[in-house]
């Protein structure tokens, strides 16, 4: 985002901000050259960047999961005695937890950015995006940090619930937020 902002300021690509957010280019382009420039930069700095980020994230997730799978398979091939079987079981649980975390992160990324990408594609096909798409984009885009917080608080909340199964998930998340020292020492 910082690089995009610098390039757009230097090339004078930002349009006036009278909506929920500013945009690249002037929506009141009257010439084909102006509109073409607007569409190219909107896609280059908007949807294409998001799609590339998503692909890199998915690729890294696959590499991490594959490494876990190889370690797990190697441990199984060694016919571990009972004392080491617990390590294998722990690794299997960690592998499953890592896969869940990765899938949640990717899901949050998609839910956050799909609306902005649809708006960009709608504009690129020379149509005006509907108000609903603009509202969904304005609602979900700022929520990326909130989704990340929930995803990364989840393992600690699950650990708390293992020690206090009678408590609610909401209580466990409150413990993670408001009592981190207690959680760290547990």
Image (cartoon, rainbow, N blue to C red):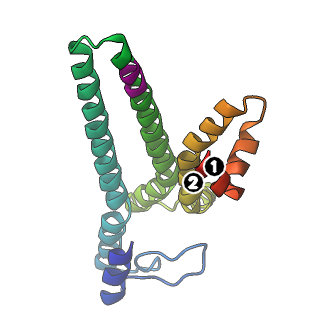
Left or right, 157 with respect to 57, comes to right
Tell whether position 88 is magenta.
yes
| Outermost residue to the front | 83
Left or right, 151 with respect to 46, comes to right
Residue 32 lies, with reference to residue 167, above or below; the image says below
Mark 2 to mark 1 CA distance (whole Å) = 16 Å
Quadrant that contains the N terminus = bottom left
| SS for dot 2 | helix
User: Percent x, y for residue 44?
Assistant: 30, 65
Which residue: 27% across, 43% down?
59
| Total residue callouts | 2
Majority SS type along the magenta span? helix
* Boundaries of the magenta span: 86-91
User: Percent x, y for residue 141?
Assistant: 54, 60
Residue 138 lies, with reference to residue 149, above or below; the image says below
Q: Nearer the viewer, mark 2 or mark 1?
A: 1
**Residue corresponding to mark 1:** 183
Left or right, 104 with respect to 58, comes to right
Which residue: 30% across, 81% down?
7
Quadrant that contains the C terminus = top right
Left or right, 141 with respect to 169, comes to left
**Residue corresponding to mark 2:** 149
């Amino acid at each position: 985002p910082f690089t995009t902002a610098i390039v757009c300021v230097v090339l004078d690509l930002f349009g006036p901000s009278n909506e929920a957010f500013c945009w690249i280019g002037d929506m009141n382009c009257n010439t084909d050259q102006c509109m073409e420039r607007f569409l190219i930069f909107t896609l280059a700095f908007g949807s294409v960047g998001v799609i590339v980020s998503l692909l890199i994230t998915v690729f890294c997730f696959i590499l991490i999961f594959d490494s876990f799978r190889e370690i797990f398979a190697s441990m199984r091939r060694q016919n571990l005695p009972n004392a080491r079987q617990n390590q294998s079981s722990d690794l299997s649980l960690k592998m499953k937890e890592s896969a869940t975390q990765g899938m949640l992160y990717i899901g949050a990324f998609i839910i956050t950015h799909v609306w902005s990408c649809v708006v960009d594609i709608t504009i690129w096909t020379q149509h005006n995006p509907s108000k609903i798409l603009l509202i969904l984009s304005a609602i979900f885009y700022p929520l990326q940090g909130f989704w990340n917080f929930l995803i990364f608080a989840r393992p600690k909340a699950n650990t708390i619930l293992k020690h206090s199964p009678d408590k609610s998930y909401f209580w466990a998340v409150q413990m993670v937020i408001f009592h981190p020292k207690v959680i760290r020492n547990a």
